[in-house]
Amino acid sequence: MKHTISLLVENKFGVLARIAGLFSARGYNIASLAVSETLDPDISYMTIVVEAKDVKILEQIKKQLNKLIDVITVTDFTKKEHVDRELVLAKVKYSAKNKSKLENVFKKYVGKIVQHKADVAIIEAVGDNGQIKSLLDELNKFGIQELIRTGKLAISN
């Protein structure tokens, strides 16, 4: 089961390494990680997605995260109401004849063509995991040449 955890942490050197070390020490791979400053530049917000079958070990990790001096708060969104989104940038094959078809794809999704040249368009899209998967299925019909994803961001309702 995938778990989404957010942390408010002090924006200091080495904090990310210590936090990642807690997960790797227990053999958990971080599936997604997003970090950025908050309104206060001395505090950063982290969203971590981790696959964990053993909930007891995940609970132990959360307890240990709370003990780290640089960690201010730990929130597990797994069973909480929240909104999550992911940003995708993709290069797809582009031509004048498929321009309208590509634009029609974005009538179903929150996305747009950011830039296009003779044979390539760069698209930007935002959505939850299911929406992003559906969009990528649609974009595969055009030919995805390159794909970059931000990872999940989450905020409580």
Image: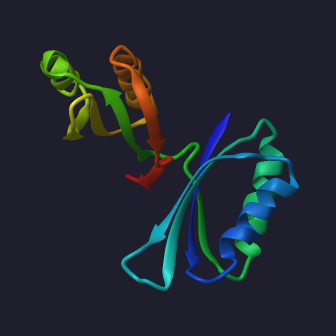
Residue 8 on image: x %, y %: 54, 71
Q: Is residue 94 above or below residue 68?
A: above
User: Quadrant where the N terminus lies?
Assistant: top right
Q: Is residue 139 above or below residue 33?
A: above
Quadrant in the picture for residue 137 = top left
Q: In the displayed image of the protein, which residue is found farthest to the front? A: 118
Q: Residue at x 70, y 78 (%)?
A: 14
From the viewer's perspective, tell me whether residue 65 is left or right of residue 118. right
Q: Residue at x 29, y 38 (%)?
A: 122
Quadrant in the picture for residue 38 = bottom left
Residue 114 in view: no
Q: 53 or 46: nearer the eye?
A: 46
Query: How many numbered discs?
Result: 0
From the viewer's perspective, tell me whether residue 62 is left or right of residue 38. right
Q: Residue at x 79, y 67 (%)?
A: 64
Residue 104 on image: x %, y %: 16, 20
Q: Is residue 89 above or below residue 104?
A: below
Residue 32 in view: yes
From the viewer's perspective, tell me whether residue 70 is left or right of residue 55. left
Residue 151 on image: x %, y %: 50, 47
Color encoding of the figure:
rainbow
Quadrant in the picture for residue 17 = bottom right
Residue 70 on image: x %, y %: 66, 81
